[in-house]
Amino acid sequence: MKSMVANGVRGALTLLVFTTLFTALMAGTYAATKSIVDKNTADAERALIAQVLPAGSYDNNLLADKLTLSLADARTLGNDEPSSIYLAKHAGKETGAVVETTAPDGYAGRIKLLVGIAPDGRVLGVRVVQHKETPGLGDYIDAAKSNWSEQFTGKSLGNPKLDGWKVKKDGGAFDSNAGATISPRAVVKAVSKVLVYVSAHKAQVFGEAA
Amino acid sequence: MITQTEVRSISHNAVWKQNPTVVQILGMCPTLAMTTTLVNGTSLGLATALVMACSGGCVALLRSFVPNELRNPVFILIIAAAVTILDLAMNAYLHALYNVLGIFIPLIVTNCIVLARSEAFASKNGVAQSTLDGFMMGIGGTVVLAVLGGLREIIGKGTLFSGVDLVFGAAAKSWVLHLVPADLNYQFLFVVLPPGAFIGLGFLVAGKAALDRRADAARRRAEEAAAGGSEVQAA
């Protein structure tokens, strides 16, 4: 009976020693890599945002100059958690805003997008950031797969008119591939929602500049 | 510490005879999910090899301190720690690739081949031998993942080395080979999706078995010929 207790205690102590040792190792690695990991994450985020802005159109830290939207405002843009609008500035003057938005009605769930908008309401760029559309069918909305998303650049609420913000198949102005219109339809709708939101909140987004 | 013959027999055993993927058929989830391109397959394979070398070495080093009945929890602890450290290191130093391999790095911990080798080999052998065995087992898996990834990439997308820039930086983008001109937008969806991986793996398993059988037959024929030859000589 006594040896069983001793055995158990020894086993528990052995486990304790091993757990402490390896936890210390992992914690050490975490501490050693944390600053690099944080920098990588920020860099990746910044690079992602920069994709929808013309090169050289800003000189500020995009992650620092941002507007955090209330949950209600974020919801009108399709996001289900508070989202942000990143401001691009050149020599202190606003040159664009990057809006996070979500199209809820993709073929396979939500499509997350970044939309860059100039202070005059023109689209600077659209990028699909996250989607689960069918590879080879609906995924051409992704800039990595085709240049479909480039057709938004330069468009605005007047060009085409709001009822033209549809795919051609629905009588609108935007191209889509035959047999895969659900994904582009969702994207077009989401982009137009962003334009409507930004034009309604122009002062709030671009401040005095607009 | 470790002899040349040992190195050769451990390597041969790990890479060919007991190949984790096409002979032991272990670690199928990452095998099927991550072999969409040559670069993805190879990267995940090498990450697994690294984890297996670390965990094999650690297990062999600590095996005399581990009571027999506590073997499993301690081995799992060692493997989990090795994977966590690799995960953090990749996140820090190979961030782009880390984004691609995503959840499959932490999942190396559940790859049964890692625990299987700790239990079957590292718990009974020396540090050098166990490290080598783990690493070579990983390499054996890597070879299969690379071949499967390469095949699926060629047949499914008509390219080779796509995504190589994730490992070597943006300059490597031009290394991508387009076997089918890029502007044709060629894609064979079935091969790109998991069913293609299943069928491809089936061919590789069968191919390995066929090669073994042919080598066996050749050996037998050579033995017979040798035996026959000596009879002739004796006559």
Image: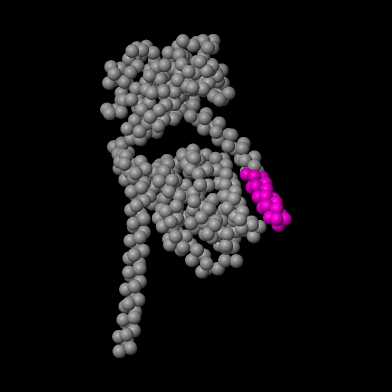
Residue under the image location 32 percent in, 73 percent down:
B221
User: In the visual, does A205 lie left or right of A149?
Assistant: right
Asked if residue A46 shows in the view, the reply is: yes
State whether residue B92 is above or below residue B52: above
Residue A16 part of the magenta segment: yes
User: In the visual, does A17 lie left or right of A94?
Assistant: right
Asked if residue A147 shows in the view, the reply is: no
Q: Residue furthest bottom?
A: B235
- The image quadrant of residue B209 is bottom left
Quadrant placement of the C terminus of chain B: bottom left
Give residue B15's position: percent from left, percent from top: 45, 59
Q: Residue furthest front?
A: A1
User: In the visual, does A124 lie left or right of B95?
Assistant: left
Give residue B85's position: percent from left, percent from top: 58, 45
Q: Nearer the viewer, residue B34 or A97?
A: B34
- The image quadrant of residue B20 is bottom left
Give residue A167's position: percent from left, percent from top: 31, 20
Residue B169 part of the magenta segment: no
Q: Nearer the viewer, residue B130 or B100?
A: B130
Give residue A112's position: percent from left, percent from top: 44, 26
Quadrant placement of the N terminus of chain B: bottom right
Magenta extent: A1-26
